[in-house]
Image (cartoon, coloured by chain):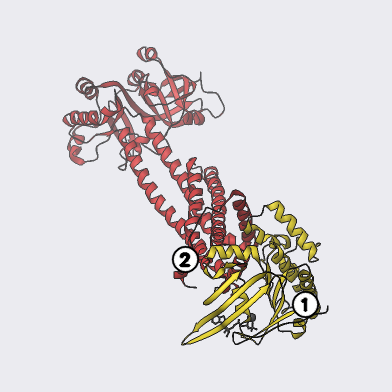
Amino acid sequence: MSRETIIELQNVEKHYQMGPDLVKALNCINLKIYAGDYISILGPSGGGKSTLLNVLGCLDQPTLGTYLLEGHDVSSMDDDDLSQIRGKRLGFIFQSYNLIQQLDVLENIEVPMFYRGVTEADSREVAAHLAEKVGLGKRMHHKPTELSGGQQQRVAIARALANDPAVILADEATGNLDSKSGGDILQIFDELNEEGKTLIMITHDEGMADRTPRVIRLKDGQIVHDERKEVFR
Amino acid sequence: MRPEDVGATLNLRGLTPWRLKRSIILGFKSIWMRKLRSLLTALGIVFGVCSVISMLAIGEGASYEAQQQIKDLGSQNIIIQSVKPTNNSSAGEQTRSLVLEYGLTLRDLIQIQATVPGVNVVVPNRRIKDFIWFQSNSVDATAVGTVAWYPEMRSRKMVKGRFFTQVESDSRTNVCVLTQKLAKQLFPLHSPVGKTVRMRTSYFRVIGIMEDQVDATKVDDSSGTNPIESGSGEGLEMFIPITVLKDHFGDVLIKYRSGSFEAEKVELHEVTVQVEHSDQVVASSKAIKSILDRNHTDQDYKITVPLELLKRAERTKQIFNIVLGSIAAISLIVGGIGIMNIMLATVTERTREIGIRRALGAKKNDIVLQFLIETILLSGIGGLIGVGLGISIPQLISHFAGMKTIIQFWAPTVAFSISVLIGIVFGIYPALRAAAMSPVDALRHE
Ligand SMILES: Nc1ncnc2c1ncn2[C@@H]1O[C@H](COP(=O)(O)OP(=O)(O)OP(=O)(O)O)[C@@H](O)[C@H]1O
Ligand SMILES: [Mg+2]
């Protein structure tokens, strides 16, 4: 394959000191992710999925090893640079939506653009466009409490797309949703990947993993399985 | 999270105007979302600021009135009053002579004028207390015999007509000037100027009305031995030329008290001495005292120096301001601690929001600014409400309690600035704590 490498992990480890025990939440991870990848991460509870995603998302720093994001060594960056990278190059989608309660749909989508320094008029326009794209064109001025779970998660997707990131990271994005709304969310993910976005999602559902061309399985902090397959949608 | 985790710092470099504007809007949204709590939080500042402004206004009003009264007495003046002696050393004398003789005499006056340098003008006056009649209407008042330049010396203004002249005094014309209070009681229906009033058997034509004034020589008079009986008759005065008073009423005042007659002889009840410069008054008053001490064995006079009263009033005001300032500072600090307490709780409560924002690209500094702006808005809004209340309460007090209040232009400004300052001082620590959390920990927070 001749696609460009977006992410490269070299011998990455994440350790937690729990009293006398050292927990290796990530144990010698080597991983390459390419532009346009669509990846499911599976594994037993406590296997290190969230830890891996937090490291990939620059929310957490690895204890050991090197993390290259688009060729930049993230493991040696300071807090301000990491914030900037999170805002500009990464998009997050969480299990519990994580919208800001005092802001309406448009304002929530605008948050990453605010921190990037986009002018108000421009960010308004982009936010409105994204709200349309995820099917919330008629809900732009609703507060999160006035939306269903599926709708809230779609706002979160629009927000993750706001700064046109290199990678979208989703930690059990459908975990709190019924199968219908969850299916809608996955539908959006599929479409985003078809448009060329790189997506990495954690899931517990083997059925969902069947939709993605690449599946990574984690157990006890190690990658036990990394396969690529043909998918028919 | 432990306090030592606070590794964040405040940096204002990235704060562009549009960013500030949007942060302020965001701050308002967060405050509005928790309306009741925000209001309760700001209440400490509201009351602090409000009480500072109104206490200052009341204090300023009170001291202004006192100072005005003292100033009306004249800063170049020394006021000497006759006082009925209270000590019993003269008791033997009193049994010998039926007439109690005390107080200032013309001889004192002449000596003062001859020996104390810089004495310019002297205003003597004598008083007689009796009923003043107009037709069938009578008022228990005081006739004050004085000289033509009395109003000028004691800064009393005429509201109608004029004061009597030197010529009228020399020619012993029966004219009089009434205080506003007396005029009102004696002439409830008529216009007094031009009418004739009577005291005992003498008639006087009213030529003017003089504005009322509070007698500030009583400011430090705790003994109550003022020669003019105070009480309901206070301020009810009829001014006539001193020459006329002497001609018509003589030197001896006779009073009928509890079954026996009591006679007093007082030549002068009050003398106002004016010196050339106000910095001479203290020295001159000492010189006058030594002269009078030689002439009077009884303590039958009292010297009032308005300038000294003024200085004393200013000192009192300073002390008052210091006490007031401390109370204000304490109440504002308490308000600030209240705000800090709530902001710390808010930071904990909004840990997740902080995590979300950090994940979406907010730097530590953005978080610090957001919480700091929110605290400043909160205390600033509290300050504004406090200024509003602080301006209206003194007006209500003036209106309903009749007390004079003065709001100085700087008081609301300073009080408001302090409330904003409190927002900064007490907001910085919660804001730094908010920013110090690691994004993963913040996101994991329930
Ligand atoms: N902050 C932490 N402190 C200590 N140990 C931690 C911390 N975060 C994670 N761990 C440990 O790291 C291991 C991996 O946790 P992680 O959250 O990545 O699992 P997961 O695969 O996401 O599980 P789940 O499917 O339940 O979400 C676990 O054993 C967990 O106890
Ligand atoms: Mg997890």
- Using the rendered image, report if marks 2 and 1 lie on a common chain: no
**Camera-side residue: B158 or A134?**
A134
Task: Single out the residue that lies furthest toward the left.
Answer: B294
Tell me the quadrant of the picture where the C terminus of chain A can be found.
bottom right
The residue beneath circle 2 is B7
Residue A78 lies, in percent from the top left, at 52, 65
Q: Chain of mark 1?
A: A
* Relative side of B2 to A112, left or right: left
Q: In this rendering, is residue B31 above or below B199?
A: below
Q: Is residue B189 above or below residue B311?
A: above
Q: Is A44 on the left or on the right of B308, as rendered?
A: right
Q: Which element carries disc 2, helix, strand or loop?
A: loop
Q: Position of residue A125 (x, y in %)?
A: 75, 55
Q: Is residue A59 visible?
A: no
User: Observer-nearest residue: A193 or A172?
Assistant: A193
- The numbered mark at residue A182 is 1
Left/right of residue A187 with respect to residue B274 in the rendered view:
right
Quadrant (top left, top right, bottom left, bottom right) of the N terminus of chain A:
bottom right
Examine the rendering and report whether any part of residue A45 can be seen: yes
Q: Colour of chain A?
A: yellow
Residue type at numbered disc 1: Gly
Q: Residue furthest right?
A: A233
Does the numbered disc 1 mark a residue whose Cβ is under 8 Å from ligand 1?
no
Q: What number is the disc on residue B439?
A: none
- Determine which quarter of the picture holds residue B173: top left
What separation in Å lies between label 2 and label 1 (alpha carbons)? Answer: 40 Å
Tell me which chain appears red: B
The x and y percentages for residue B154 are: 38, 26
Identify which residue is drawn at 35% across, 47% down. B319
